[in-house]
Image (spheres, rainbow, N blue to C red):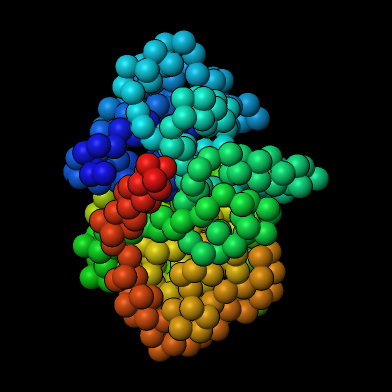
Amino acid sequence: MHPSDLRVALFSGNYNYTRDGANQALNLLVGHLLSQGVSVRVYSPTIDPPAFPPTGDLVSVPAVPLPAGRDEYRLARGLPAAIRRDLAAFAPNIVHVSAPDILGHRALSWGRRHRLLTLASLHTRFETYAQYYGIGLLEPLAIRLLTRFYNRPDRVVVPGRSMADLLRSWGVTTPIGIWSRGVDHARFHPSRRDLAWRRSLGIGDDDVAIGFLGRLVLEKGLDIFADVAKALAARGVSHRVLVIGDGPARDWFASQVPDAAFAGFQRGDDLGRAVASMDLFFNPSITETFGNVTLEAMAAGVPVVAARATGAVDLVEEGVNGRLVPPRDVAAYADAIAAYIADAPTRLAAGRAGHDMAQRYEWSAVNQAVLDTYLAAMAERAR
């Protein structure tokens, strides 16, 4: 079987209406598949205008805003008749779902009913969200539901070994492959560092800027980040906080780190400049399955202090390109960051090591791994 024989129906809960790491990866995957001759049709909720133009053909699936103050996201309630007719006309031989939502479940059911190859990719640790929204008791239930979901498709692909190990520990028995992530090495590079840009934000050349990069939402560990910044200040450790991104929790976060420099949402080469202009990247999130932002910081030559959790453990080599800290251990985070601030040569060496390690991550290679998974699974079915 050749790539041109493949017809992939890809289902996403958010393909392009709000920019995040997951849908950036999906759009890059679709671009690679199309370049190899694969036919792809994407099904996702949409808004007008979207955050960015979609790659490939996108079919809008009816959806409603999420409740509980997260109405920037949409929830599709299933596969209505018009979508099923469109699917029938497209006639896919692979159904690829990227979220364990209602749309994902219905798409898997549709694919199984039509005896098609089904594959699920995992992008977010949704079970961890409960603790950030005061409903931590629901986490075991979430794990059971996710285990059931990822046991339904014929194949699962995850960003790294740590996520594969986690799924297996839950009881997922579906064959699991790796779809890692890449980085734009021209954009995220140490040469992008810009002291004049830092000065425009009130950050001095000798200041050590501790960076946050991502959407400003509670599940990114904003509470821990703020507590660590306060702990450093209480110790008299001189530093500045540089925040790259925006989101619904911005005002709350700004109230917790009032002396921070907020650069807002950055994109393209401006984002590369912002990341390279950090002196240290701090990522306390435990919701990451890979941590695109961690890889981007590494590529830009910025050392990392991160939670010892999925994603980061696949990227950060302890004491070489960064430090891994037990999740939510504020004192340990402060210790690791203070040590880097006090020892500039070690900090710079860690940044160089991260840059060197990041070179192995190329989008073309990691996306080809998904295409290879499709082809191998289809060949197995044929046998």
Q: Farthest residue toward the right?
A: 137
Judge by depth and name the residue closer to the eye, 158 or 262. 158
Q: Farthest residue toward the front?
A: 383
Measured as percent of width and height from the top left, residue 46 is found at: 40, 24
- Total marks in image: 0
Judge by depth and name the residue closer to the eye, 339 or 358. 358
> Residue visible at 29% across and 71% down?
359
23 sits left or right of 227 in the view = left
Quarter of the picture containing the C terminus is: top left
6 sits left or right of 253 in the view = left
Judge by depth and name the residue closer to the eye, 99 or 326. 99
> Residue visible at 46% across and 70% down?
315
Q: Is residue 293 visible?
A: no
Q: Farthest residue toward the top?
A: 81
271 sits left or right of 163 in the view = left
Measured as percent of width and height from the top left, residue 210 is found at: 48, 67
Measured as percent of width and height from the top left, residue 294 is found at: 44, 63
Q: Is residue 373 visible?
A: yes
Measured as percent of width and height from the top left, residue 378 is found at: 37, 43
> Residue visible at 36% across and 62% down?
296
Q: Is residue 247 above or below residue 165?
A: above
Task: Residue 325: name its quadrant.
Answer: bottom right
Judge by depth and name the residue closer to the eye, 20 or 364. 364
Quarter of the picture containing the N terminus is: top left
Q: Is residue 40 above or below residue 273?
A: above
> Residue visible at 30% across and 46% down?
28
79 sits left or right of 375 in the view = right
Q: Is residue 279 above or below residue 106?
A: below
